């Protein structure tokens, strides 16, 4: 295969070779190459197959807008589909494969689709898969899904790390071309904090791809020197390989830094990619412009390339796409490609310019170089099999001439890269001067410069860039005297858009990535899809990974032409983030797997581990689920032992996860009276009380105990799940609703480790544990009493409250003493046979006792529903009181809390089963409620449940059905409605 | 039988790695034994609280998210009329002493056990913090004495900027909830790993 590598250095290191494979074949490139430039250098033109018709495709561009050269990169778990070869930095050992072809890239069976192209037109799916409707789910959708998609993602877990980071700056410069460099330099010299993001790995933009003189220096050299100066400024951060992909509210930008994509694999502890959230006081959009292709027959054939891309390959990478390259242009810029090719001694068989008149300077230079020039001419079609071998050109007199060439450089004019200017809703404005959209209605504090603003000259880029950088720095408080702009030669930037070549015979592609042809656009126009948005949805124009960067305007202009309008009338679509694809891994950052979210450990966690506990993650917390003894392999056995040990002896459980809010202030009692539905102000010092609080809408929000330690000092406990939300609720009430009340709130949840000591021997245990520190006798510390005291030199609190239904206490100690305290409790309780118990036993005992918990406080239940209606005070106002009285919330047929037990004791109840009358059909109309919690009750010796049933306790004793088609257990069970308090309904044990 | 629950003073980070990656880009030191109290002025008493604290400790409580310190005392503003005061090795008695000092002028909550605190220093500490907290920690924006209540990997944290020193460079204290010690350590260690992370117990 011929080498297309030219002499000279460009921006590659010719002294070093880099080895890589494509479709299993080994090639060499150089450091500084992209995969695309190295493939072109090796003479590889066929790189992939198109999405729909499996047509052979090559390399069209030299940037991130590439629609064709999508390859699979790497292998195994790192296999990554749809990577644009034009932005893949070559590294030693790189492995790439073509995609969307079978059995091989050269011979692809799927190419038969191309023969069926008259069938696969725009709207094919909408029109074809309408009927019969029954086929949709079983036949059509699976078939379409199989055919859809491009490339194969790895199904293994991604072995790499991704992370997120935050940055702040005075001036964010998006784009490191001449305008961006000038802006960053001006702002950086003034002393502002500057971040310059450039998606390429090399700063300079078109200065690397074109030949310019700036202040008598080569443009690429100037760019390097500016980059060096910027790197030396302490407040400037240069971020290459970084794409600003989105603009968000609050001057916030999303940027993706490809930290290690250019390495075979990331180094130790190095992330593969880093997602930046950048907050900028001012932003300079210097994202340049994207060259537009021209639509003509066979314009997707490998060898058809954008003219600017050809120049980039020639000048930066020292590669020619082919030995002979024709040029087809509608603007002055395309001529640069012809001249650069000639200077690189590449044969240019013809320059076709659709314009009848061009500048004399161009004509003179072409004539000096001996170029064949055809003005007022158009390329109609390309010829060749898997690559261009020739073109058919219609000259100005209408004759079609066949010209042999291996490639064709196409220059259709430039589209300013307006994407980021539209992310917050701004719409670009049509410019007749350049025949493209330019940014208008920019986001607050953003300014566009250079080619991104429609100024296509280098002098303009340098001037507007420097000015914007200086202005941005100035508004951030960094003033610098203006400097004269660098000296550059005048250049020709004229052009006239050519939306469609007339008279081609082959298929002409408007969007090569989604195989949208001129025929598809014509159908859309005929069928009335005239707006840019509808055009996109009907034809899929611009829906590929490139999001229509090079195709959208051509498609819109074509519809405009076909419907007798101008592109300006037609309008364009808004682009949305991300500008280029962002891996999901980068969005997740470090929050994956077991680090998906932070985990809270209880103060006794290490002790529980040492006891062989099993754990369960509940909300934010990891809690001990059970403490199985050696040989206890059956969860039920452990459960029964733990429950019976508590019920007959004593057990200990870590309940530190409950929220604890310290409420102080002269108005603390009045404040809590307004928060809780039941009376709190009447609570004596040294006592605690169960309380419920409602939401503003009358639904129960949370429950817990309130303990009063002094006249103006309370400690409220909340459920674990609502700990932070209750604090928010209280803070809202304090700060917004009643700022006149003197109340101070503090979360003390983390300060205290708290252990429930429960069971008939709990008092004996505490006597042994606390000794003289506190009198825990029934007289001194009756049911619901609370006390503050000192134990072992540290503050401690004891609450006589019970969740289990037994004589029980909760002992609170400072969290650092939690581990020591639980060990002390176990030691003190050893002669009493103390057992640790976990969440399973805790849950079982509260169901036996009929205590409501998260499954019942589910955001839809009222106090009445929960059997707590009598707690709602009629003597005072409180949050939720008025709306709790709404007819819907007080209707007598609302499902209310009841207990259930199975008619046959051996069967298992499951939460989620719905209640039906015996013999009723399972339907929504017959639904009477559901089981909210179910457990095996060691005391009862069978399963029991809590649930909500229409008619509630009025139906105790009735037999109904529990219907559960989902959980895989018994679908239908007969159950008996019971009192929800299965255990010690009189509460004697609590007070013993 | 009595077992002293204070018998074993354990590090909140015991059992976790003391070095991650190679190098010493970030040096973390666990602060132990710090007495911490939250002081919220009762309505109308903020000026008295500030005066009493300044008179007693010689540290001016600041209005706004700033901290001041003298000897073993530091006081930081954390919300309107609310401060966090710390004292080295003063135990839970510190909160009680503040209660005696301020009487009915303020509500005091002892939080000595509520937090784990890592002092972070080293040449790459700012790059590491940039991965962790969504606030601007540039020396011009987050100045010495700055205090921020912010988030770190979905955890609530408080960040204090201390004096830079020649020996340790820029220095920050990061405060997290005690129950989150393992997750906080994991997040910081992972963010610092590429620069090299080492942890000491003071």
Image (tube, rainbow, N blue to C red):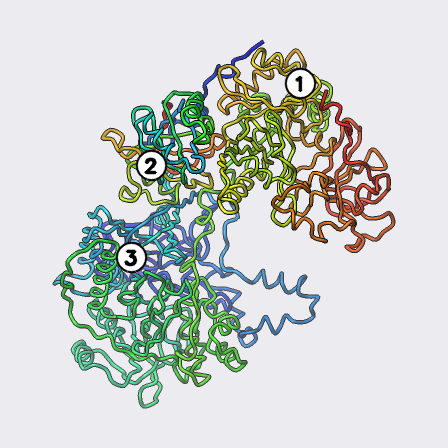
Q: Is residue A81 left or right of residue B29?
A: right
Task: Give the camera-side residue of A363 and A679.
Answer: A679
Residue A431 is tagged as none
Q: Secondary structure at mark 2?
A: loop
What's the CA distance linking mark 1 and mark 3? 68 Å
Q: Is residue A687 left or right of residue A903?
A: left
Q: Residue furthest bottom?
A: A397
Residue A82: x, y in percent? 45, 57
Residue A17: x, y in percent? 28, 50
Crowding near the residue tagged with mark 1, few <14, some 14–19, many ≥20 C-alpha atoms within 10 Å: many
Q: Secondary structure at mark 1?
A: helix
Above or below, comparing residue A357 to residue A84 in the picture? below
Q: Secondary structure at mark 3?
A: strand
Residue position marked by numbered label 1 in the rendering? A762
Image quarter of the N terminus of chain A: bottom left
Residue position marked by numbered label 3 in the rendering? A173
What's the CA distance linking mark 3 and mark 2? 37 Å
Q: What residue is at 67 percent from the left and 17 percent from the top?
A: A779
Q: Residue furthest left?
A: A216
Q: Do tags 2 and 1 sit on the same chain?
A: no
Q: Disc 1 is attached to a residue of which chain? A: A
Using the rendered view, name the quadrant where residue A614 is placed. Answer: top right
Residue B62 is tagged as 2
Residue A724: x, y in percent? 53, 39
């Amino acid at each position: 295969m011929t080498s297309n590598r030219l002499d000279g250095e460009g921006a590659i290191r010719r002294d070093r070779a880099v080895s890589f494979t494509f479709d299993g074949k080994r090639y060499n490139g150089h450091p500084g190459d992209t995969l695309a430039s190295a493939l072109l250098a090796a003479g590889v033109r066929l790189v992939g197959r198109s999405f729909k018709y499996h047509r052979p495709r090559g390399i069209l561009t030299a940037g991130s807008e590439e629609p064709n050269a999508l390859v699979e990169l790497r292998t195994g778990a790192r296999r990554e589909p749809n990577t644009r070869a034009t932005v893949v930095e070559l590294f030693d050992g790189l492995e790439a494969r073509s995609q969307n072809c079978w059995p091989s890239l050269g011979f692809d069976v799927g190419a038969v689709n191309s023969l069926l192209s008259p069938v696969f037109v725009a709207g094919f799916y909408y029109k074809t898969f309408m009927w019969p409707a029954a086929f949709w789910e079983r036949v059509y959708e699976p078939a379409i899904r199989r055919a859809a998609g491009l490339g194969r993602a790895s199904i293994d877990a991604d072995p790499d790390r991704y992370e997120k980071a935050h940055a702040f700056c005075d001036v964010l410069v998006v784009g490191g071309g001449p305008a961006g460099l000038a802006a960053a330099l001006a702002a950086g010299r003034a002393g502002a904090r500057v971040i310059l993001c450039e998606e390429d790995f090399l700063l300079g933009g078109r200065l690397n791809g074109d030949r310019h003189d700036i202040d008598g220096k080569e443009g690429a050299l100037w760019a390097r020197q500016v980059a060096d100066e910027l790197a030396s400024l302490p407040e400037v951060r240069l971020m290459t390989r970084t794409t600003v992909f989105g603009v968000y509210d609050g001057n916030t930008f999303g940027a993706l830094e490809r930290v290690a994509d250019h390495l075979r694999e990331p180094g130790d502890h190095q992330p593969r990619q880093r997602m930046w959230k950048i907050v900028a006081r001012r932003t300079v959009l210097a994202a340049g412009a994207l060259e537009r292709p021209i639509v003509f027959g066979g314009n997707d054939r490998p060898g058809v390339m954008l003219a600017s891309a050809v120049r980039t390959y020639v000048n930066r990478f020292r590669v020619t796409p082919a030995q002979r390259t024709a040029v087809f242009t509608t603007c002055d810029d395309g001529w640069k490609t012809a001249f650069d090719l000639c200077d690189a001694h590449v044969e240019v068989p013809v320059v076709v310019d659709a314009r009848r008149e061009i500048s004399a300077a161009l004509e003179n230079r072409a004539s000096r170089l001996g170029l064949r020039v055809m003005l007022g001419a158009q390329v109609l079609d390309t010829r060749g099999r898997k690559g261009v071998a020739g073109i058919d050109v219609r000259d100005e007199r209408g004759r079609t001439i066949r010209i042999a060439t291996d490639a064709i450089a196409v220059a259709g004019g430039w589209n300013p890269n307006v994407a980021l200017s539209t992310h917050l809703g701004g719409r670009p404005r049509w410019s007749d001067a350049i025949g493209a959209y330019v940014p208008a209605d920019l986001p607050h504090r953003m300014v566009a410069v250079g080619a991104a603003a429609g100024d296509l000259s280098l002098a303009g880029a340098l001037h507007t860039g420097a000015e914007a950088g200086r202005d941005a720095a100035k508004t951030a408080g960094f003033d610098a005297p203006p400097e004269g702009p660098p000296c550059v030669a005048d250049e020709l930037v004229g052009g006239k858009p050519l939306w469609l070549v007339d008279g081609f015979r082959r298929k002409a592609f408007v969007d090569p990535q989604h195989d949208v042809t001129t025929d598809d656009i014509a159908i859309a126009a005929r069928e009335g899809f005239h707006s840019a948005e509808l055009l996109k949805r009907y034809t899929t124009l611009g829906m590929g990974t490139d999001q229509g960067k090079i195709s959208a305007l051509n498609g819109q202009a074509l519809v405009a032409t076909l419907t007798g309008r101008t592109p300006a009338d037609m309008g364009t679509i808004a682009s949305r983030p991300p500008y280029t694809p962002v891996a999901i891994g980068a969005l997740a950052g470090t929050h994956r797997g077991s680090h998906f979210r932070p985990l809270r450990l209880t103060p006794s966690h290490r002790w529980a581990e040492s006891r062989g506990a099993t754990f369960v993650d509940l909300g934010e917390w990891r809690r001990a689920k059970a403490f199985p003894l050696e040989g206890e392999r059956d969860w039920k056995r452990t459960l029964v032992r733990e429950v019976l040990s508590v019920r007959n002896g004593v057990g200990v459980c870590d309940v530190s996860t409950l929220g604890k809010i310290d409420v102080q202030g002269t108005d603390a009692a009045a404040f809590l009276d307004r928060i809780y539905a039941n009376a709190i102000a009447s609570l004596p010092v040294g006592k605690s009380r169960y309380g419920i609080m409602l939401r503003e809408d009358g639904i129960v929000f949370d429950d817990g105990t309130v303990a009063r330690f002094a006249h103006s000092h309370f400690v409220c406990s909340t459920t674990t799940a609502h700990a932070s939300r209750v604090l928010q609720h209280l803070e809202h009430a304090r700060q917004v609703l009643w700022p006149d009340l003197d109340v101070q709130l503090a979360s003390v949840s983390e300060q205290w480790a708290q252990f429930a000591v429960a069971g008939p021997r709990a008092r004996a245990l505490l006597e042994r544990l606390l000794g003289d520190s506190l009198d825990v006798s029934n007289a001194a510390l009756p049911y619901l009493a609370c006390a503050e005291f000192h134990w072992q030199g540290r503050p401690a609190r004891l609450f006589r409250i019970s969740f289990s239904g037994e004589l029980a206490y909760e002992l609170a100690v400072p969290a650092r003493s939690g581990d020591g305290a639980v060990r002390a409790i176990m030691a003190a309780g050893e002669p009493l046979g103390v057992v640790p118990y976990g969440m399973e036993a805790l849950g079982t005992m509260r169901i036996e006792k009929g205590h409501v918990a998260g499954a019942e406080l589910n955001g839809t239940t009222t106090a009445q529903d929960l059997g707590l209606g009598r707690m709602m005070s009629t003597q005072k106002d409180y949050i939720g009181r008025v709306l709790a009285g709404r007819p819907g919330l007080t209707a007598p047929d609302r499902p209310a809390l009841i207990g259930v037990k199975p008619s046959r004791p051996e069967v298992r109840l499951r939460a989620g089963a719905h209640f039906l009358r015996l013999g009723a059909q399972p339907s929504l109309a017959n639904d009477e409620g559901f089981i909210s919690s179910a457990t095996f009750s060691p005391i009862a010796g069978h399963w029991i449940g809590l649930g909500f049933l229409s008619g509630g306790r009025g139906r105790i004793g009735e037999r109904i059905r529990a219907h559960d088609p989902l959980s895989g257990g018994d679908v239908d069970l007969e159950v008996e409605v019971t009192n929800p308090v299965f255990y010690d309904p009189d509460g004697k044990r609590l007070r013993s | 039988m009595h077992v002293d629950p204070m018998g074993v003073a354990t590090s909140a980070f015991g059992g976790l790695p003391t070095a991650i990656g190679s190098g010493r880009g970030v040096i973390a030191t666990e602060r132990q034994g710090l007495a911490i109290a939250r002081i919220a002025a009762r309505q109308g008493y903020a000026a008295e609280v500030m005066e009493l604290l300044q008179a007693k400790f010689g540290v001016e409580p600041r209005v706004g998210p700033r901290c001041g310190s003298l000897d073993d005392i530091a006081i930081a503003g954390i919300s309107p009329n609310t401060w966090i005061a710390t004292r080295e090795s003063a135990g839970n008695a510190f909160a009680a002493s503040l209660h005696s000092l301020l009487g009915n002028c303020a509500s005091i909550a002892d939080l000595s056990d509520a937090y784990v605190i890592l002092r972070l220093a080293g040449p790459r500490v700012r790059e590491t913090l940039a991965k962790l907290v969504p606030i601007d920690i540039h020396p011009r924006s987050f100045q010495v004495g700055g205090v921020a209540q912010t988030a770190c990997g979905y955890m609530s944290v408080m960040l204090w900027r201390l004096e830079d020193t020649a020996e340790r460079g820029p220095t920050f204290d990061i405060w997290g909830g005690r129950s989150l010690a393992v997750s906080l350590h994991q997040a910081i260690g992972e963010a610092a790993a590429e620069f090299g992370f080492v942890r000491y117990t003071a």
